[in-house]
Amino acid sequence: MQLFYDPTIASGPHQLRAEEARHAFQVLRKRTGDTLDLVDGRGGWYQATVTEITKRGCLIEASEIRRERARASHKLTLLVAPTKNIDRFEWILEKATEIGVDVIQPMLTAHSERKKIRPDRLERVLESAMKQSLRAWLPELRPLLTFEAALAGASPGDVRYLAYLGEPDKTPLLRDNYGQKQDVTVAVGPEGGFSPAEAALARTLDFQFVSLGPNRLRTETAAITAVHTIEQANW
């Protein structure tokens, strides 16, 4: 299935957004009368028939097939420090979307090597991953925040975890600490890990220290390990 994304899609006549129209007709060579499968990024699945193609755009007649009430039985928020190599950070977004995540919160930490990101480019990565994995839910990408602001913004009802390297003998495994169907926020730091001061602050904000395993992991590996651990627990 070739899936298209349009956040404003609704049943009835609709003009397909320009980016998707170009892909459909210039790359895939769709024509009038062809059928398109679309999602709105909020759980809605649509099927549409192409009714008109012009130089200015594409008109379709859409109907909603089904609506998923929620992505999963739980909400997963990933707090993560952007990597120095932006390709690695984009890989995090891509794979986290494929596995299952609801919110991605980039954050600046004491050891962060990347201070800026391009939200427009990262949004396109998320959209592509959603379509490739045939999902109807687009993760929310939040603006880059400081470590303190990112942690303070965690939802009040979430179980909160911080992947911490500073106490290896005292830190339980995430997989042994998380229960099914719990809304959860997981924080993953940069290559140098979280500083002791950041760890102390996290404790005051009710974050529990957890380990992702015996090996020292790159940021992107740690982030995906955390996401997969949570999702696997809910399968």
Image (spheres, rainbow, N blue to C red):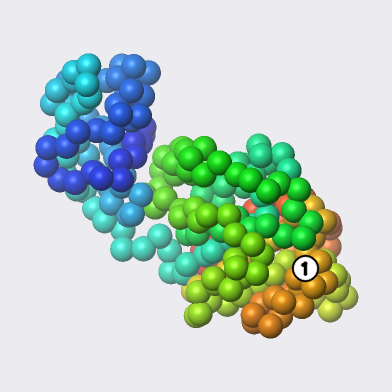
x, y percentage for residue 166? 85, 70
Name the residue rendered at 71%, 80% in the picture.
Answer: 203
Residue drawn at x 77%, y 68% is 164
Residue that sits furthest to the right in the current view: 169
- The residue sitting at 76% across, 48% down in the picture is 113
Q: On the image, which quarter does residue 179 sit in? A: bottom right
In the foreground, 98 or 87: 87
State the image coordinates of residue 177 (x, y, percent, origin top left).
Answer: 67, 77
Name the residue nearer the viewer: 159 or 143. Answer: 143
Task: Answer with left or right where residue 39 lies relative to residue 86.
Answer: left
Quarter occupied by the N terminus: top left
Task: Find residue 60 and report its horizontal and vertical position in percent.
Answer: 17, 32
Q: Nearer the viewer, residue 142 or 88?
A: 142
What is the x, y in percent for residue 148?
A: 65, 69
The residue type indicated by label 1 comes to Tyr
Say left or right for 165 vs 122.
right
| Total numbered badges shown on the rendered structure | 1
Quadrant in the rendering for residue 207: bottom right
Residue neighbourhood size for the residue with mark 1, other residues' Cα within 10 Å, grouped as few (<14), some (14–19), many (≥20):
many
51 to 69, vertically: above or below: above
Compare residues 202 and 50 and report the one nearer the observer.
Answer: 202
The residue that disc 1 covers is: 164
Q: With 150 as the anchor, is 58 left or right in this view?
A: left
Visible in this render: residue 152?
yes
Disc 1 element:
loop
Residue 172 can be seen, yes or no:
no
